[in-house]
Image (cartoon, rainbow, N blue to C red):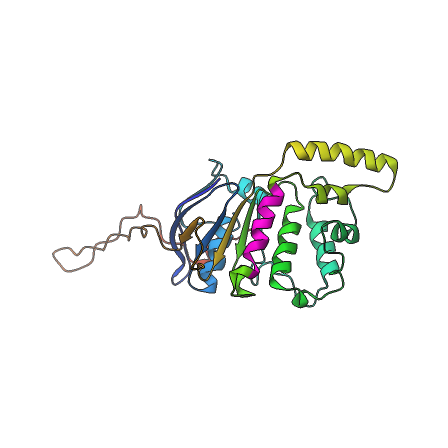
Amino acid sequence: MLTAENLYVQGRHSALHAPTSLVAEPGDILLVQADGASARTSLALTLSGRMKPTSGSLHWNGDSHPGLLRRRSALVDSPEVNEPELHLRVKDLVAEDLALIPRAERPKASPARWLEAMGFGSSGDLWIEQVPAYERIRLLTALALADSRIDLLVLDSPDRHQGDPGAWLPALKDAVAAAAEAPAEAERARAGRTRAGRNRAGRNRTEQNSGARDLAVVAVVAQLPAWWSGPAAQEGNAAAPAAPPLESADESGVPAPADASLTATPDSAETEVTA
């Protein structure tokens, strides 16, 4: 479970996103409405443990260590952060993303066999820009979940590709449902060509089936669908951080120095972003 309380990030001149509180439960899709592309990206980075908040708290299953949240979460399709480059073909994107997963956590199949096993066999030669919104989200969430450590997906502005949520929300629902079930497709992709490989894959299937993921999904969007009845939150729904006290003047009219114990608000150069 992801829990954020009064989560706030201050940039050099203004807030990157307003104070926000939310809870993302395993097995659910939480839609978070945020105004402005920069606010959506800032919130997505912070919720996935990639950006250090200025104030507030963020916990994954009760643990506030940012390294744990980064290991257990995946930031998906964030503009100008990790969105796929349009000049890539699908098969090249898959090869790159699978290679970035630690060897012990990645599927053992080749990119081509992984695409076939996951139902993307006919898409390998397409350019990324040719992939429809639903298939794009389905592909990118499947690539994120190819890392067996991932239990939280944070999507940045999935509605920017297709305003109609019917074009991308079903892909997120499919991802949650597939993670909760025995991931037979992923395990078929692990199977080797030899009998020994098939035996190892069978053992892997048994282990994986016993530990199916209870996936939590957070999608930071420009607008909540009018018909959405699931979990939802809004950027800025929490109390604003307290302003520092004003300087007071002595009898001579000279302002007294501010309390040296107060911590200055960090500028954007002090805001930590981690990959």
Instruction: Tell me what residue is drawn at x 35 percent, y 49 percent.
Output: 263
**Left or right side of 99 for 250:** left
Does the image show residue 86? no
Residue 16 location, x and y as percent? Answer: 42, 59
| For residue 75, side relative to residue 8 (left or right) | right
Q: For this rendering, which residue is in front, 144 or 175?
A: 175
Residue at the spot x=76%, y=43% of the render? 188
Residue at the far right in the pictured view: 194
Q: Tell me if residue 29 is in the magenta stretch.
A: no
**Vertical order, 171 against 196 (above or below):** below
Residue 191 falls in image quadrant: top right
- In the rendered image, the residue lying farthest to the front is 227
**Main secondary structure type of the part rendered in magenta:** helix
Compare residues 159 and 51 and report the one nearer the observer: 159
Residue at 20% x, 58% y: name it: 255
Query: Which stretch did the figure color magenta?
Result: 167-179
Does the magenta-highlighted stretch encompass residue 178?
yes
Report the front residue among 152 and 161.
161
x then y, percent, for residue 258: 26, 52
